[in-house]
Structures are given as structure tokens and as C-alpha cells.
Image (tube, rainbow, N blue to C red):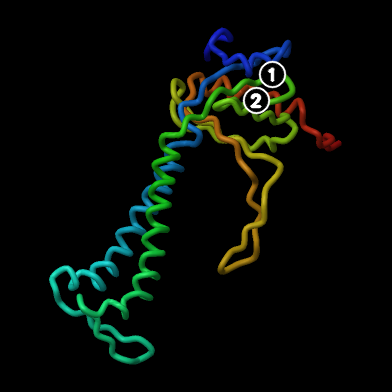
Amino acid sequence: MIERDLMPQALIDNVGNENKDFLVKAARSQPLRNSLGVLLFGTFWLAFTSIFVVAFFGPLFSGNEVHFTSNDMPVVAGPNNLKPLILPGLVIGLFVLVGLVMFGFGLYLMQKKGGYYVGTPTRLINYYRGTIRSVDWEQFSGDITVSGTETKGNITLGMRTGKMVSSKNGPERYVPDTLYISGIPDVYEVERICRKRIKENDPTPPVA
């Protein structure tokens, strides 16, 4: 954990006189596996669409014609007749753009920092580049996942809010929102405090 003197002034002002359970600086905004998943998906998507790019446009770079069918009619395109390739080019270009966006977003997630996290008896505060987010402990469900090591670990906090996600081969399912505290030291101690505060602030009445 880090010292109070290293906190940004805006965060110090926001915390005020509240007792601080912990103060950590997250190395990333999300666990590394999340950003790697997006990055690998973008890479796979680009590799898949490159097959169509080579098939349609490869011969043109060699000065040859491209033969394909459109509406069951044979079509021939070449360096001097590119008009038939406009529509296929737009469709393939859209798929390539999706892959580039996914790949770039994966790189962005890998490099994005998580900012400061402060735990108090009533809330969890996140400060990142001048923006402060405060979440009351009662908003968390108590579903906590810890990964990594004691010196550099990740905490995933499940929340009571969420959304319904449709499934292709089944009914809709409820997916809770999550909050990540990634790449922090003393991860097990921070997790213990989070669990304690969530339980203390649980709004649901105990079952007799």
C-alpha cells in the first residue's frame, strides 16, 4: 500500500476525514487476461479477413484479373476495371476495420492504468486522471475473485447491478457488473477488507 502523502490533492479532498482502510495504486484498469483476450480475438479476426483480402486483391498487385460470381453471374475485374470490386471491397474493408478496432482496443486496455483506490468504512473510491468514482459498499454483491500473487494481484468485485444478455442457443441470462482492482500489492489483505466492509454494509436483512 502507498502513503497518504502520495495521493493526488483532489483525492485527499474527496476522502476528507474518513478513515482509510487501504490505499493502493492499480497498475492496470483490468486483469491482463481480459486485455489479452480482446487482443487475441482482434488478431484472429484480422488473420481470418486477410484471407479474403489476398483472394480478392492479391492478383491485382500482380497485374492479373480477379474472377468471382455475383448473383450467380460471373464477374471479371482487373487493374483497368475496378468497379466490380467496390462492393466486395467495402464489405471486406468493414471486417478489417472491426479487427483493427478490436486489436487497438486490446492494446489500449493493456496499457491503461487503474489509478488510485481508497477503501473507507462506507465506500470504495477510485481516482484516475482527475476523475473520481465513489461506490458504496452496499452496491457490491460479495462475489469476489482474487488472482495473481500477494505482491501483484487482481481483485474482481461483483456488483448488484447488471444486465440481461441474450444467448444464441438459450434464454437470456443475467450478467452482473464488475469492478476491477488490478496489479496491486497486498492483494489478500485488500480482499479481506473489501469482504469485511461489504458484509457490514449488506442492505439485505439476515435470514432468521
Q: Quadrant of residue 3?
A: top right
Could you say where residue 74 lies in the image, as x and y percent from the top left?
A: 28, 90
Lateral position of residue 8 relative to residue 66, left or right: right
Return the x and y of residue 36 as percentages of the image width and height. Answer: 39, 44
Residue at the extreme bottom? 73
**Tag 1, which secondary structure?**
helix
Give the alpha-carbon distance from disc 2 to disc 1, as whole Å: 9 Å
Q: Which mark is residue 125?
A: 2
Q: Residue furthest front?
A: 80
- Percent from the top left, x then y, of residue 6? 53, 11
Sequence-wise, the earlier of marks 2 and 1 is: 1
Which residue carries the number 1 mark?
A: 14
In percent of the image, x 14 and y 73: which residue is there?
Answer: 63
Relative placement, left or right, of 192 versus 52 is: right
Point out residue 117 in the picture as x, y percentages from the top left corner. Answer: 59, 23
Residue ID at (53%, 26%): 115
Position of residue 74 relative to residue 153, above or below, is: below
SS at mark 2 in the image? strand
Classify 10 Å Cα crowding around label 2: few (below 14), some (14-19), many (20 and above): some
Residue situated in front as seen by the camera: 16 or 62: 62
Please tell me which residue lies in front, 44 or 151: 44
**Residue in front for this viewpoint, 14 or 179:** 14
Tag 2 and tag 1, C-beta contact below 8 Å: yes
| Amino acid at the residue labelled 2 | Ile
Identify whether 155 is placed above or below 92: above
Q: Residue at x 55, y 34 (%)?
A: 180
Give the crowd class for mark 1: few <14, some 14-19, many >=20 residues within 10 Å: few
User: Residue at image x 67%, y 52%?
Assistant: 163
Q: Quadrant of the C terminus?
A: top right
**Residue 101 vs residue 118: left or right?**
left
